Image (spheres, coloured by chain):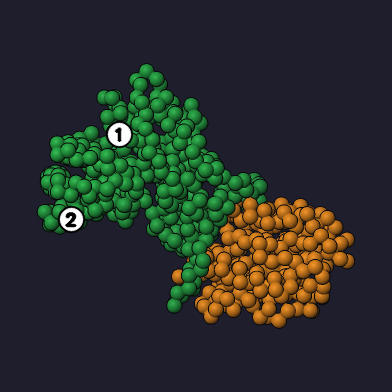
Amino acid sequence: MYAVLCFGDSNTHGQMPGGSPLDRYPYDLRWPGVLQRELGARWRVIEEGLSGRTTVRDDPIEGAAKNGRTYLRPCIMSHAPLDLIIIMLGTNDLKARFSQPASEVAMGIGCLVHDIRELAPGPGGQAPEIMVVAPPPMLDDIKEWEQIFKNAQPKSRELALQFEIIADSLEIHFFDAGLVAQCDPSDGFHINAEAHEKLGVALAREVEAIGWK
Amino acid sequence: MPDMRFAPPNPLRIADRATGLNAVSVRSYNERLVLSLLLQKEATTRLEIGERTGLSAQTVSVLVRSLEQEGLVAKGPAQRGRIGPPTVPILLNPEGAFSVGISVGKRHTDLVLIDFVGEVRFHTTLAHPRMDPDSNHSEFLETIRGAIAMLPEKARERLAGVGLALAHSETNGRDEEAYFRALQDEIEAQLGISLFIQNDITAAASGESMFGVAKPLTDYMFFYLGAKLHGRLVLNHQIYKGNSPLSFDVGIDALETELASHGKPLGPLWDRSGDWSAYQDLIEGWENRVVEQLRQSLAGLSQFVEFGTVVLSSYAPQSVCQAICGKLERSTPGVVAITGNLKPSPKAVGAASLPLSSRFMVE
């Protein structure tokens, strides 16, 4: 039995486009649920998606609880041993309050990778396999979120390249979610059930391609 | 002291978004290792690549991704077995790289264009370049320039290089290796392309080993039946680079003399897809002499090396080579004789394999 932790934000939580964090797709429609279905009984998929989660930043408005770095440590310890950790974060780091370029968001992803390797929650105290997933780019029209995410759209289109550079340099698995899924027009940065399905299936193929005995 | 974990990212090799092949200098040893396994069909999945190289799954993932972006490899459709997880094969992209091979033979110059998996995309026979000792090798310059001009655009953009196979006799008594190196430097400087020169018999052996019947073989005796009969010893996939000039006059030259004395037409003899059926009654005796020479060579060699496989490569008709192999097996118990399958010119395909092995494989 293998265990995979899906560490992400509202798009891992399954928040419906245009809704609130309580408007959540049911388990079998969210991408971790799709991943579970595709990988089958040999795998246990663990969901850890929080609306508003950043890579490494305490959110001065939404609160320190949204900092992915501080939560990741106890989270990993709670779920260890883990064979694979999938990280899909980055969109919330583009909020105007953080004023960060895409490359700094990628540096944040790098921090999480270093922390995982330090904790070494894989089988036998090894580092687990790590896969970074670049979130699908935001649409130009993000409705009432325009001010909160001021100027975030072009940066969100750079995330895939910056994440891949980090992934190449730290030698970890990488997937660009934008290849299979787009954000839903009702708010421009959340993914709908159809996109969850496509993403879950694509990630299952990526996980299988790693090769497991 | 700064924490180097948070220094600017320094990728193994940033996936180059430009199309076309990356420069030779940036192709890492590990990438070559992966491509070697794929070229030798010794691995088809990332798991197998990791097992055979000892590289971690994540490193293999980075390498395969960058080779994929460069268009050298592609993912195949997932294979679902009855048990276990589905496997995702990693395949070479045939259009990922092309290579030109030119073999300057006694009567013809063969030119082939092969793709990344050794498939011949184009073949033509050119006139033998006119050798002029004072002309600074312009005979090869023109042949190569003409060959590149003939290529389709997409092959020119992804051309790994040109391989030139020369007979030992072309060296005119000079040291072969030094002569080839000087010629290579000169042509590369003039044309600005990567050129690889090799002895033609060794090239044919390389071709059979990389793309032909000898692919799965580790130790064998390689024979090339051309105008004369030549041999090369291959141990542990390595072609012994003695480039022995020794050859036996039982080849197609000898057959020609015999056929001429009986007034037979000689055209098909040197044709790359010639029909030899008109020679039926005369060919038997010649075949027997070839077999006798092969048998003697093997007997001599068996004092030093024990091996059971012979590869016979030739542009002569497949049926003729098979007859020779059959007779050799009957006269030398314990030996398995295999007919080479590089068409239409083993030497030219072998020459074309050189740029691919030099640029994409580990030594």
In the rendered image, what is the letter of the chain coloured green? Answer: B
The residue located at (60%, 46%) in the rendering is B19
Q: Tags 1 and 2 in contact by the CB under 8 Å rule?
A: no
Task: Mark 1 vs mark 2: give the one in front.
Answer: 1
Q: Within the image, what quadrant is residue A119 found in?
A: bottom right
Above or below for A43 versus B277: below
Looking at the rendered structure, the secondary structure element under dot 2 is helix
Q: Which residue is mark 2?
A: B326
For disc 2, the chain is B
Q: Specify whether residue B309 is in view.
A: no
Say whether disc 1 or disc 2 marks the residue closer to the N-terminus: 1
**Which amino acid type corresponds to the residue marked 2 in the rendered image?**
Gly
Q: Which residue is mark 1?
A: B107
Looking at the rendered structure, the secondary structure element under dot 1 is loop
Q: Are marks 1 and 2 on the same chain?
A: yes
**Between residues B7 and A25, which one lies in front from this camera angle?**
A25
Residue B327 placement (x, y as % from top left):
15, 54
**Which amino acid type corresponds to the residue marked 1 in the rendered image?**
Arg
Above or below for B65 versus B234: below
In the rendered image, what is the letter of the chain coloured orange? Answer: A
Residue B217's label in the rendered image is none
On the picture, is B355 further left or further right than A36?
Answer: left
The residue located at (77%, 69%) in the rendering is A184
Crowding around mark 1 (Cα neighbors within 10 Å: few <14, some 14 to 19, many 20+) is few
Residue B131 placement (x, y as % from top left):
34, 24
Can you say which quadrant of the picture contains the C terminus of chain A?
Answer: bottom left
